[in-house]
Structures are given as C-alpha cells and as structure tokens.
Image (tube, rainbow, N blue to C red):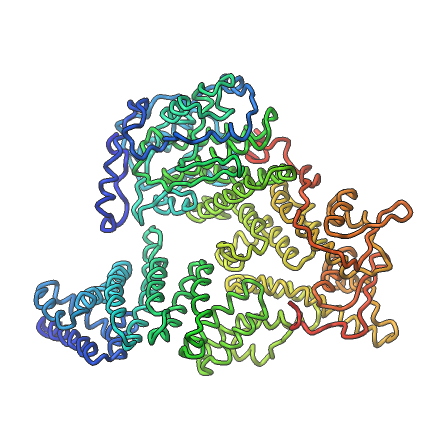
Amino acid sequence: MAYGGYDWNRRLGDYISSVADALNSQNGGQLSTLISVSRGSYCNVVAAGLDQNKGQDVNRLSRQLEKVAPLGEMLGQHMRCMQYFVNRRFVDSYNALEKSANAFLQEFRNWESAWAMKALHTVAYELRTIAEMADKEMASNGKIPDKLKGAGSFLMKVFGALAGKGPKRVGALYVTCQLFKIYFKLGTVHLCRSVIRSIETARVFDFEEFPIRDRVTYMYYTGRLEVFNDQFVLADQKLMYALVHCDPLKKNNIRMVLKYLIPVKLSLGVMPSKLLLERYGLLEYKEVIQALRTGDIRLLRQALQTNEDQFLRSGVYLVLEKLELQCYRRLMRKIHIIQKQKDPGRAHQVKMDCVLKALKWLNIEMDIDEVECIMAILIYRNYIKGYFSHKSKVVVLSKQDPFPALTAMT
Amino acid sequence: MADTFPASHGDMSRQSNSHDNNRDVPKPSSSNNNNNNNNNSHGEFDSIGRHGFMDARNSHQQNSSRKRNNRPTFWQRGPIAPSMSWRDQSRLAEMGSRNSYDIPDDVHGDAAGRRPQSTGTQPNAEPHWEKGGKWRSRSNKSVPPVRALAAYSDVGVQDEGNLVTSIVGTCQDMCPVREREQRQRLRDLAIFERINGKTDETSATLAVKRTEHIGNDFSETKRSWVTVCRTIAVAELQPSDVRPQHVLWETLQYLLEMTDRRDCTFESVHAFLFDRTRAVRQELSMQCIANSQAITMIEEIVRFHIMSERELQEQIAGLRNDADSQLNLQQLSKSLLTLLNLYSAVEAEASSGWAHEAEFHGYYVLLNLGDRGHSKAEPLALWFRRVRSLVLQAPAFMYCRRVLRCYRSGNYKGFFDLAQKASYLQGCLMELYFGEIRTLALRAINCGGYKTHPFLLGDIAELLLMKEDDTEEFCKTHGLITCLDKGQLYLTAKQTTFSPSIQTFRHQCSLISRKRAPTFFQEIVGVRDKN
C-alpha cells in the first residue's frame, strides 16, 4: 500500500471535517457532492479509509463524527453505505443508506430553510439507484427483490416532508419523478395517482415554479400514463410540454420523449418528418408512417410484426395497433380520390366491394360483413363522415368534409 | 417431529425477536389432534359464530354420502415416519402419492415431472428417489422456498420479509381431524359433507378443509358473503392441520368431480368449491410447493373459476345480485396471477416452456380486455413487457391478441368471428364482453346506417351471435324500435331514442355451450381424462 494507515485516517478525518464545514456553512451543494455514492468522488476515499481502518480506530472515528452532530449517526451509516457500495455489496449498502436517509430526513424536517435540498435529492437519487442494484443482487441470489419497493415507500415519506406549504415545496417534484421511475419499473403505476393529485391540485404553488428539469421529467411520465389510458389529447399536451422544454442538447432525453410522442401524434393524425426519425434514430416508426400515408394495412401489420418486440417492451404496441382504423380511413380517402378523378358526380359513393377488392389485393382476408362493420365503426368514431347502406353495401360519404381532422376526435 | 419446521433460509439479521419466539410456538404432535384447540389462542378452526354458508344459501337436502362412502380412502394412511427431517418428509409424502394412486402420464407430459418441493440437493435421498416413477426429476434445479412463496403472494400467506418458514403437512384426510370434529360439534357442515343429511355427522371421505378465515359473516339481508381473510403466519400452524401435496391433489380431484353433480344447483356446488379450492391454494403456498403438479392444480382451479363465471352469469339473470360472480372473478384473477408467477418461478423441463403457459397467458389478456379504468391492475401495455417471447408467438396467445385487437378497435364482426373459433374456456371469458360489444354494434349501426334502408334483424342476430327473438328484446332495452315488413323484422337506423342499457343481456350463447367437453370435469382437467 502506498499510503500508511495514518494517511487513511487523516483522509477520513478530512472527509468528516468537510462534511462538518458544509453543515456549518449550510452549503447544500457541497454536502450533496460529499454524500453522493454512486456518482461521487468521495465514495472511494471513504471506502478505502474504512477498509484500512478495520475498526481499529473506532473511538477516534466516533469522536470525529461528533463534529458533525446532529448528523453523526447519519454520517456513520452513510460511510458504511459507501464502503459496502465500493465492495459491491448492494443489499447491505442499501440497508445502511436507508438508515442514513432516515436520520437525515429527520434533521431536514427540523431545518426551516431548504438549504439542504440538493443533498436530500442526492439521497433520494441514491436510494432509488442502489435499491435497483440491490434488487438485482437479491434476484441472482434466489431471494425476492423488495428493496426498490422499500425505496418507494421511503420516498413517499420524503415527498410528505416536502409537499406541504413553504420553501421546501420546490423540491417535491424531483422526488415525485424518482417515485415515477420506481413505479414504472415495478409496474405499480396506479400508485402514481395520489402523488399526481398532490402536485396538481395544490393552489399555493404554481407548477411553473418547479425547476425546469423536474417539470420535463414529470410531464414525460404523466404523458406516458395518459398513453396507457388511450387519452391521446392529454398525452399530446404533456409530452409536447416535455419536448419543448427539454434541453436541446440532451439528445437521448428528446429521443425518449419522441418514442411516446410519435405514436400519440400518429393517433391524432400528425405525421413526423423523415428527418426527425433519422436524427433521433427512431427508424422503427418509418414503415408504420408509410403505411398510414398510403393506407396499406398489410404494411402496417408487417411493420408492427417486424418491430413487435421493441414496441411491446416500450409499451406502445397497443397504441400502434389501434392505428389500423386510421389506415382504413386513409384507404377510403385514396379510393375517394381515385373515384373523383373518374367520375366526380358519384365519387362520394364508395362500394364496399371496392374496399374488399383493395384489401384482397393487399392479401388481407376479410368478408363484406366485416368491411361493413369497419365502415360503421369509422363513421361512429368520426373518422369519416357519411352513412352506409346495409342493403346495397354502399358507403355514402358526406359531401362536406368527409374526412374530418382527427384532432377533433375523442 | 421437532424439526418439522425448517431452519430459516435467508438473512437472519432481519429476523425480529418476536419472530424468533413465534417459530418456537408450535409443538407438532400427531397424537393430540383430537384435543380441542382451547389452548390455541389463534384458533385457526375456531369457527364459533360462523355460519355454515352452504346452509344459508341452500337448504337442498340430498344424500351425498352414498357414493363417497364407497370410495377407497387412500388418504387414510398412517402418519409419515416421524424421524425424517422436514425435507425428507416432503419426499416421503411425495412417494406416497406415487404409490397410492395412479396419476396418468399425460398430466406431466408437459413438464416431465419435476420433483416437488425441491429445496436443495439431498444426496442421501437421491438414489432412493431415482428408482423411477412418474415424479423422477431430471434436473437438479430447484425453486428456493422464498421464490415459491412469492409466487403465491396473492393467496394471503405471510412471508417474513425474505425469511421463509415452510411447513410440511402431515394431515392425511381431506379435512384435518380437528376441524372435522369441531364442525361436527358445531353442526357446521356443508350439505355435501353430511352423512344422510345429518348436520352433525360427517366422515373423512366427505369433509373437506375450509379456507382459513377470521371474521366470516354471511349476511342474509345483503345476500353477500363478507370474508375477511387473515394473513396466515406459517409459524402458527401445526403440521397435522396441513395436507401434504398428494392429499391436496386427491382432494382437488374429488372437488372438481363435483362440478358435474346434477342433484343440486350449480351455485351450491360453486360455493362449496370456491372456498375449498382456495384452501388448497393456501396450503400449496404454506408448504412452498412449486413444481409441475402444483402448476397443474392451479391450472385446474383457474379453469374451474372461468367455467364457473359463465354458469354464475346465467344465474344472475334471475333475482340474485352478482356478489357470487364478483367474488369468483376476484379469485379467478388471483389464482391466475399465482399461476403466471409459478410459470416463471419454476423452470420448465421442456425448452418450449410449460405446455399450457400460452393458454393461460391468453386467459389473462381475455380477462383484462376491457378498460377497467381505475383498477389497480397493471395496464395491459405494461404487462406485455414481461411476457416471454416464446409465449407471445404461441398460437393460443396470438389468438387472444387478435381478440384484443378487435376489441380495442371496435371491430364487432371480427370479435364475434373469433368467438366462434374460441375454445370453450376462451369463449367463457369472451362472453363476459358480449353485452358490451353488442351494444357498441347497435350503436354504430344506428349511428351510421342509412335511414331508408332498414337493417334486417336476422342479419344483426347472426352478426352478434344471438337468436332473433333475443335481438328484438335487446334492441328494445336499448330504446330502439323494430318494425315488421312482409313478415320480417327490421331495424331502422338513426333512431334518436338510443340509450345504452345497463341491464346487460345474460342469456348464454348456445354456440359457446356447444364447445364444452362432455362434462365440466373433463373440461377442467383436459387431456388427463382421456385415459
């Protein structure tokens, strides 16, 4: 070892003194850097120090920790957490972190100002990150992963400490976003509802006052929630907000927003440009869009099948599948245009047989009754305006605006 | 017998002191079963004040004992060798099952007989084990008890964090002696459990263990069955109250055969089985049994609930409210979730996964087709993320995805076309949505149809898989008038009086009924019954 034991002890002592300094000067930024685990530079120093120490100088250490009262206990646990983390014992690391976070939260509640907000956010971030690692470790050891769930409950407590009135509320949205990440990962998205209610119903605090970073993340997740409920207009608003306010340099974040915004926009009849798809590497949507442009049901089905795995994993498959109705609408429109060129006088009468032929040409097996059913649904859902005759198997399109804008559709 | 309770697996540091004490409480003993349980403060079978709900529902008297009394009683075997450790006990119980009755080969054609309760390697027991028989395991992979119990998380058996105490039952009857005697004394016997209809006399071949409850209350006025299910701490149980795997298997077969009884109403049979099959699931959970036989059992229970749902819907048309159906649906989704968990917890022998994995994943889709709005269930879009690709492409699952597509796009013609191709059980689930889809169809036809070209009612009936008379009635309940022209009924479109009916149309669709196997039992156990 290049350093003697004394050296490491001194380094530990320095670390603890820096924490004490940050506390005394109420420097939240510095404290945050000091207690960062997974992306901090102090983690290795502390871990190496404790490894070298091997409990020989416990008294000395605890004497040093007294300097950071009332956070002595917290820092003790936190240093343990760092040590376990560096040694890749993530379950132990998480357990220590939760104790540390608990002690920190108690003190945080007592402080009137929000100076330590940044440090609390770091704690929240670390809780989620290390819990995920701990869960992986548990799963590979044949145990039931429950740390992320535990982190969720703990962050709800943190949220409770922030969500009230006062200067701390500004930090609540960050914790909300961490909670969303947990709930989406665990598939328990119904838990998002109570947090959303608490954020959106508060009149004392304007949403725009939250930091921009948190607002973007929040809108991204709530937008995705609306996608699950097929609420495309709301999803559009939220995801657009996220897109517009997202840092233009964060290309990957923009891509994540677009991944969900594109299917939503498509459902509302808005097609993205090819350039956009290429710039953000979202070429899996290319064929879907082409199918929608041409009314090619077969191509749509093929495109969904080719990228099935990707679409299913990102959770947009069901939305894309629903685009089929829009594709039928486009097909009707194409037929309408062709008929207009041939015989403008009777162009608005489309024989179902004609649709059937087009579908047969695309190798889509369907009988005339199903074509009629689809026409009925298109009319009922306001994809096209007109009526159909069961007896003569004809769709009569409205002479005015037979294909209304989809954005008006509910 | 002292070591019937296994040492804890997992992180001892999480264990609280109180838990330590709990684990020492049970003193398993096979001889004191007959004592009443006054000394047991928890009183698992303490059913004073509990109504025998069978009696409350149905006073139907029948002589159910005749057939069952003649039944050979394989479960009346002696206690299992007491000197064995708990792990070996489970083995013994298992081998008992192998010898005592014949399990046709078909059952485990899918999984080639994974050995039950494999909690680790036991070299000593292995040669003994390998002597052959249907349960021989070809692999040494095991399901840790923690994961087995996690799979059963919907059953209501407690796990202590990551610390599992599993128990191995020694009860050789369908109903533990203690519960049987107590219920005899309290005259708390279901009609199917009585000898010659006597409310205080039953036998080992008739009584079946009930689900562990506290605070049961069957309220006659509300006609609802309120059950507060207690979370069972495994440490409180005695092995003599728990049935080992082979007894559970045999019990389940006995129960499922009852579905075809014609001497009583289906509701009474369902009420009996609803509770008893749940007890079977509970005990599989308590003993951390996760193997191919457990999977087969849960599969059968799920099928039972699906098929029951249809029968119960038929009954609802009358005076009853749908409390039975609600409870059945609840248990259906719970047991289905348990099953899907088991599929992923227990690794299948075949590389193609479990034989019925796709079938049951499909049932999940069919059960959750509808937008259940504010339910706590995971949105289907998120659920799909976790479905294995193997299942995604399987024909049985692809079929259900097509149904989902038709449902979501409102393609009622496609939906009913698919319904005609459904298996019986798929049909049972799809029928739950028939009312909703038919309403949509009427609405769309009424909205988009041409006013002067009325729709022939017979065509609508054919489209919606209904009889013409029923279609007429269905239109009426939706505020639509039909008119008669040249002896045929027509529906005119653009009627402004359309109002969606809450009163859904309950008549069973004969098309689905025709798909059923000759008996309910055959439908539930599937291929196994061909022998």
Residue B57 seen anywhere in this rendered image of the structure: yes
Residue A402 located left or right of residue A342: left
Position in image of residue B149 (x %, y %): 37, 44
Residue B130 falls in image quadrant: top left
Residue sitting farthest toward the bottom: A249
Please give the name of the residue rendered at 40% of the width and 21% of the height, measured from the top-left corner: B185
Please give the name of the residue rendered at 51% of the width and 16% of the height, measured from the top-left corner: B196
From the viewer's perspective, is residue B177 above or below residue B300?
above
Residue B480 located left or right of residue B56: right
Quadrant where the C terminus of chain B sits is top right
Position in image of residue B80 (x %, y %): 32, 26
- Asked whether A318 or B353 is in front, the reply is A318
Please give the name of the residue rendered at 23% of the width and 75% of the height, measured from the top-left corner: A34
- Asked whether A217 or B478 is in front, the reply is B478
From the viewer's perspective, is residue B97 above or below residue B479?
above
Residue B111 located left or right of residue B214: right
Residue B132 falls in image quadrant: top left
Residue A87 seen anywhere in this rendered image of the structure: no
Please give the name of the residue rendered at 33% of the width and 51% of the height, measured from the top-left corner: A143
